[in-house]
Structures are given as C-alpha cells and as structure tokens.
Amino acid sequence: MSGIIKKQLENLSKRTDNYMKEKRLPNSMRWIGSISVLWKHYYLNYVTEFIVILAILFAIFFATGSAKVSTYAIVYALIIASVWIVLKIGWRFIRASAKKQEIIIAKDGTLRERSPSQWSLVWGRYRKNKIALVSGAIVIIVTVIAIVYPLLVPYSPTGITPLYDSWNGGGALSNPNLKYPGGTDILGRDEFSRILAGSEVSLTVGIFSTILSLAIGVTLGALAGYFRGWTEEIIMRLTDMFLALPFLVIAILAVSFIRRGRLVFLRQIPQSIVIILVLGVFGWAGLCRLVSANTRQIYNLDYVNAARVLGASNRRIIMVHILPNILAPIIVIGTLAIAGGILSEAGLTFLGLGSPTTISWGQMVNEAQTVLKTNPELALLPGFAIFFVVLAFNLLGDALRDALDPRLRE
Amino acid sequence: MDKSVAVSLKIIGFVLIITSAFIPLYAINFDSEPAETEIIPDNPSGLLVSSGNLVRVLSFRVDYKLLTFVGEDQKLTARYLINEVPSSIIVLSATLWFVMIFAVLATVLGQVFQSGGFKRRGLIADISAALLLLVGLVAAIIAMNQTLFIASERYSAVVSGQLSTTEILNPITFNPLDATPSYFNIELIGMIQPGFYIFIMGIMMMVTGIFLPVNWQQPTGSQMARKVGSFGPFKWIKHVSSLRVTTYILRRLLTLIPLFIAISIMTFVMVSGMGDPVSLLLLGKQRVTEQDRINLTRKLGLDQPIYVQFVMWFFNLLHGDMGNSFTSGQAISNIIGGLVWETLKLQLAAFAIALLVSIPLGILAAKNQNTWIDSSASALALLGQSMPIFVFGLLLIYIFSGYGLGWFPAAKAHRIPAPTKVFSGETWAFLGGGGWRTGIGWGAWWGNVSDRLLDSMIHMVLPTITLTFNFMALYTRLVRSTMLEVLRQDYILAARANGLSERVITWKHAFRNTLIPVVTFVGLFLATALAGAPITESLFTWPGLGQKYIIAIGFLDFPMILGTTAVLTILILIGNLITDILYVTVDPRLDL
C-alpha cells in the first residue's frame, strides 16, 4: 500500500517538474521576455496619453503669450507630462504588485507553497490602504522637492528680484498672481519659491532629529530592558528627568543658549543643526520607555532563553533576537516623531528663534503676522504647508501601524 | 477599591490635622523704605508734586499694591513696590490650589465611576460625599483669599514718627518729595496661617478616605499588622508602614526630589551660559565706567562662582524667594503668582471644553465603528493633531477678529484695567475676597465684577477655541480606542447576552471602564498643556507665563527664566505624581 502511494507521489513530482521545466524560459531569456511582454501590452496606452498631455499643455503654454513661458513651453510640457506618466505607471505597478501565491519545489522534490516573508505581508496590507499610498506618495514628493528645490524654484528664495518688478505683479507685498503664484513678502521675495525652499529645513530637522532621538532612545531603552538592576535604575531615572522637562520651554532655552550664549564656538553651529540637536537630545525619553518595556517583555520569551543557553553573547541576543522583534512600534513611533519634530521646529522658529538667513516655514508665518490684514496668504500658505506635511506623516504613521501589526490597530 | 487606599488617606489626613495645630501663626511685618516706593500722582501736572508742598492726608487706603492717599483737594496714588504678601505664601497657595482641584476631581470621579460605589451605600451617601468635598473646596478657596487679603486690611502707618491706624482722626501731613523727615512707614500686620490650609487638606483627605467605596472583603494592606496583633500606637505604625499605597506614594515623592534638583542644575547651567545681562542692562547708558559694571555685577550676584550662585538660588527657592527681576526689580514670585493664574485659566477652560466635547465624540465614534460618523470624528482628530497651533490661531484671528468679522478681540486678556491681585482679585471677590469692604458699595462692586468677567470671557474665546481644537484631537483618539477595546471584552458580551439594553451597556458598563485611562490622563495634561503655552500666548499676546518667558529670554532676565522653569517643572512633577497615584488607585491589579 505504502509503496503504491510512494510511486504515485514520485510520478506527481516528476510531472510537476516537467511542467515547470516546459514553462520556464532559459535564464538568459526570462527577464527580456517579461519586459518585452510588458512593453507590448502597455506601452501604447501610455505613449498616447503622454503625447496628448504634451500637446494640450504645449498649446496652453504657448497660448499664454508670455515670452518666457512660450519659449520654454515644450520644456514645461515635457516635464509635467513625464511626471504625470511616471506617477501613473508607478501607481499601477504598486497597485498590481500583488504577491502571487508562489509554488516552489523543495529539496526533497515535493511541491510546496512558499510561506510569504513578513515584509511581503506588511507590503500586502499596506498596499490595500489607499490613504496609506497617497500619504506615502505625498511624503516621497515632498522629500524629492526638499532635495531638488533649487531646480524647481522660479526665483531665488533669498533674492529680491521681484521687488524691482512691480509693474509686472512683483514689488513688495503683492497679491498672488500668475507670475508670482504666492505673492511676494515684505522684502519683495517670491513667496512660492520660499515655500518650496522651506521644505528642506522642515524635513531635515524632522527626519534627523528623529534619527538622533531614535539612536539615543533605542540604545538606552534596550540596555535598560535587557540589563536589569543598576543600569535600568540609572537609565529610567534619567528618562524620568527628561520626561518631566517642560519640552518647548527647555528647547527655547537650549536654542538661545547655543545660538547666542557665552560659549562662542557653539554659535558657529548652523541653525537647523542646532534645532536637530535640541529636539533629538530632549525628545528621546518617551521612546526609551517604550523600547525598554518591549524589551523586558521579550526578554522572558523562550527563544531568547534558548539563544542564551546556546551561548549567544548579550550583544548578539539584543541585536539579532530582540531588536528586530520590537521594530514595528519603533517604526511607527519614529514616523509620528517626524511629524512632531516638524511641528516643534515650526513652533520654535515661529517664536522668533530662527536665524534670519535660514528659510523656514514657521519663521515665514512669524514674519507675516504683521501684515496679516493685507496679505493673509503670506502667513497662511506656509502654515498650511506645515499642516499638510505633518498630516501626511501622521497618516503614514497610522497606516504603518495598521500594516506592521494589525493587533495595534485602534 | 483597595481598602489600604482609604485607610492611608485617612491616616495622612489625620497626621496633617495634628501637624496643623503646631504651626504658629505668622505675623507679617513689612516696612517700606522711601527708595522702593514710587509715587505716581493722579494729576501729574498738579501743584502737589511740582511745588513740593506738604500734603494734608485726610485718609488713605492700602490696596494690594496700591496706596491711595486722599488729600484735601487731590488724590495721590503710590505704587507699593515691596512685596506685602510673602512669596512663599503665594507659591504655597497656588500649589495647594492645584492639589485640591486634582484631589476633588479624582475623588468625585472615583466616587461616581468606581463600580460598586452606588450599590453599597446608595446614592444619597455619594451625593453627600461629593457635596462635602465641594464645600471643603469652597471653604479652602475662601480661606486662601481671606488670608491673602488680611495682609492688606489691617495696617498702621507711621508718618513722621506719628502712629496712625485705619481709623484716622487726625489728618497726616507729609511731603512726598522731601527726603529725610517725611518718609512714611506702612506696617502691614496680618495673620497668615498656613496651618489652616493644612487643616483643610487633612479634613478633605479624611473625608475622601471615609467615603471612598472600599472593597472591604479583601483587606490586603492590614493583614501583616493583624498577624502581628499588637495593640496601642505600635499597631498603627506597623499598619501604616505595611500599606503598599502609602509606601508607594512616599517612594515616588522621594524620587521627585533628586529629579527636581537635577533639572534645576541643568537649567541653571544653561541659563548662566546664555549671555551677559550686565552689558545688556548697561546698553544705551552713557558714561558707563568699569566700576559701574563691577557694581552691577556684584549687585545682581553674578560675581560669584556658578555653583555658589546655584546653591544660593536653590536655598532661596526653598524659602519661597526666587529673587528679583533684573529688568523691573520686582520679586519674581509676585510676578509669577499672577501669571500662573492667567495661564491656567486659559488651559483649564480649554481642557474642560475639550473633555466635554471629546468624550461623547469618541464614544459615538466607537459605537458607530467604520461609519461616516467614525471617519469624520477620526478626520477631525487627525486635523487637530496635525494643525500647528499658531496656524489655526492665525486663521481664527483673521476670520473672527478685527480683520474680518470683528466679533472677538485678538490680543490681551483684559481691557478693563484691574487691581492686580492674586487670582485676578475682583473676580474672586464674590467668594469672600473682601471686594465690598473697600467701600465701593454693592452696586459698583457688582458692576465691576460683571464687567470684568464678561470682558475676560470675551478675550478668552479665541485662545480657548485654538487650544481646545488641539487638545480634543488627543482625547478623542484616546476615548475612541479605549471604548473599542472595552466593547470587545467578554463582560460586554455577557451583558448583551443577558438582554440589557444598548444604552445601559454603553453608559453603565463600557463608559465607566473607558474613564479609567481618561481620568489618569488628567495628570499628564499639565505637562502637555504648560509646555505648549509659549506659542499660544505669544500669538494672542496673552499675559501669561509663556509670553513673559519669551520676553525674559530676550532680556536675559535670569531670575525670571529660572523661576518660570522651576514653577513649570514643579507643576509637571506634581501632575506626574498624581497620574501615578491615580493609576494605582483606580487599578488595583498593578504591582507596585
């Protein structure tokens, strides 16, 4: 009886082997083939759409009659159309990147279903959430803008070229118009360029201050949770101290201490790095508590004990067995901390602690307060820029929480 | 509720009452010196000051900081710059005020929402307990106002060697411009009795302990004492030391002290390195010699090494003295006493409204999960979380203030000038502050009070909405997620299976359990609210701690910066302590 079953199983596996072999192209041909198939199927739609958009935009730009716009009409149209097409293709790829059920042949020749990896499951959950995709796209776009904004700004964000252009919509405190989409500020600088340029400081501060506080908080938290006793006691008292600080008040103090204090060498540090340092150094305490609590929870699990019995060093246990298992809450808190960092930076610069040479959204709001009656857009545009970026990061954090660990969902 | 909580509260209350009996009455005796009294005549161009004639004073009145002399045909107002009320009393009063509010909140909420409270003793006992507590609170506030006002009520004046009291029969003659003979010496004799506060605290704690709903079936704390089984006072000592909550609270209190010292050292070092206030103060003065610089440095105490400065500052802080402002020369504790109230008025109003709005909203969202109600509530919360405070505030100012509809003022806290008293003086007069005793008359008094109330409420609208929008986001999310978690529990399923109506399940079973994290959130509120105060206050030019703090940073006013930071830190530490105690109290499952 068992012999027959064995034979049948053998046949089955042979048959599937042959099936797989027939279906499979030679290795050299596989990728080329897939690309060609893809091309044949999809290219026509996209090329048509691209050309149509290009033509319409070119016509619109040419019809404006402005010398600058019509000279570079084809360039602008090309840029906008290609961005549109790239976004569309990317969107389609992302939506279609469903993990197909993968059937593999194991070493013993049987047919098995490959269990999907953790990150593919996370991606699968993330992909289904439209808000998550949109917020992720906004975050990516803002990051790209923050990097390449010198290529995008129509005027220098610090220069006062529009001030001498008052006959054509420029001058100081002009209202928004087609040439200066955000209007111009008190000194006659282009508001639109300044808003684009302000993304750099916001994102830099948000991301790097979070990285700094992650580095401090995760290290200390893991140490406190893993090594009990005195280590934990000292680190937790330190954490208590930092939690009891009135955050913004101390941050104001620290920024003014560094920027105009008696220690002259500290004044050389650039503004954004000062804020990164202050936010990072005073913002890690909550994270440290979270990490230490999670570490303490995992410390008692069986696989950690097993690793310890097998003679793994403390460092290996922390790095290999504990940290990857508490990564999910760390990522979520980190994303939300970026939003918090952007808000804190805006608050600090709104209070007038920014340097006049740095372009920052909060500082722009602060400067525009005096002309709120005549030019509300000068205050509200950078304000809403902060709002949208923070909103995107908050949404991203929520989506990541849902995707990384569905149990954490509210 | 654990029995040990109630018993330890009772014991602590008893100890406080006993202690209050041993604290002697204070008699305050303040002397003003001519140099520190600034004479501001009502009529600057009048004969009075310019001619330097003697003024016959028919009567005079001492208000909190104003000294009014009524002459034969003029009225002269002197601003009294010395601190009449010792700063330690102001700090103590403010601290006690917060402690009392939180105690009452915690007790009433714990009273009402702790399961089993209603069943065991009935509604009347609960209501009477709550009423008693409220009476205690009102009595405490009245007592506090009274003691603060006593200082300004009985006085005697020594003018040119003549002693005069309130009942002046003979008019006094004095010359404000003459330096030597006619200095006036006002002695304020008042009775300040901190023991009274402690007595009130003790009463409140005892009442709390007596009326707490206690699970008498499981005495955990007193078991050890019972086993020892001794009699007399030793039994009580053993009893108290074996109470886990008492020891926990004491342990937490002990950890707060080094924490506060460490934070103070850090702040002090940063503040000392912030710049040179001496050259800032001498800026713009003409003919400044090196000697002036040295003198000023010595006068401000900046010539000492930094650790000596710190020890002196900390020692004075422990005695309720935070030093004098570099710029105005006033005592910091006097400045801060008024500012704390302005800040907390705003924050507490916003906090209350946010709770009132967000609890129903969160419950509604949780009950209608995944419907449009839920998603719009979540969207609102997300909006409030992502919107920077100052952008929302600017939007409100642009729409509702003078630029647009012009409904509400956008700046300042008051338009009607107020007598500067602790806790905004006249607004509290109806609680026994003594507003009517100054001789204005009831009608004028009521007119003043109502005008000021209305005025300050109109000024509060925009900042309160701004803050509420910000706080609401946090609380709505918290209530919603907790409610969802509670609704998933087995006992809700059991209640539903027993055929209880949905209303009863929501409000009687789920809602009470939802409130546990919300109640414990009250303590944490202080930290989040006070730390964010500078932004709102400088946007609305609100005369609170935050705005003055920013100004003080600009002027390098070291004592002001240090004082503000210390007060904020103390408030946050108290908030954290209360949070911990509430956690332990409402959830006996926690191990300490």
Image (spheres, rainbow, N blue to C red):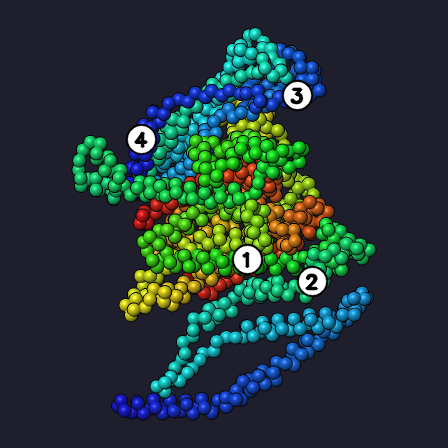
| Closest to the observer, A14 or A248 | A248
**Other-residue count near label 2 (Cα within 10 Å), few / some / many at <14 / 14–19 / ≥20:** some
Residue at 81%, 66% in the rendered image: A67
Q: Secondary structure at mark 3?
A: loop
Residue beneath disc 1: A206
Residue at 64%, 40% in the rendered image: B410
Work out whether disc 2 and disc 1 sit on a shared chain: yes
Residue beneath disc 4: B14
Q: Please tell me which of labels 4 and 3 falls first in the chain.
A: 4
Residue beneath disc 3: B42
Residue B357 screen position, x and y as percent? 51, 46
Which amino acid type is marked by label 1?
Gly
**Other-residue count near label 3 (Cα within 10 Å), few / some / many at <14 / 14–19 / ≥20:** few
Mark 2 and mark 3 residues within 8 Å of each other at the beta carbon: no
Q: Is residue B113 visible?
A: no
Seen as rendered, the residue at the extreme top is B170
Work out whether disc 4 and disc 2 sit on a shared chain: no
Closest to the camera, between mark 4 and mark 1, is 1
Residue A161 screen position, x and y as percent? 76, 57
Q: Please tell me which of labels 2 and 1 falls first in the chain.
A: 2
Which amino acid type is marked by label 4?
Phe
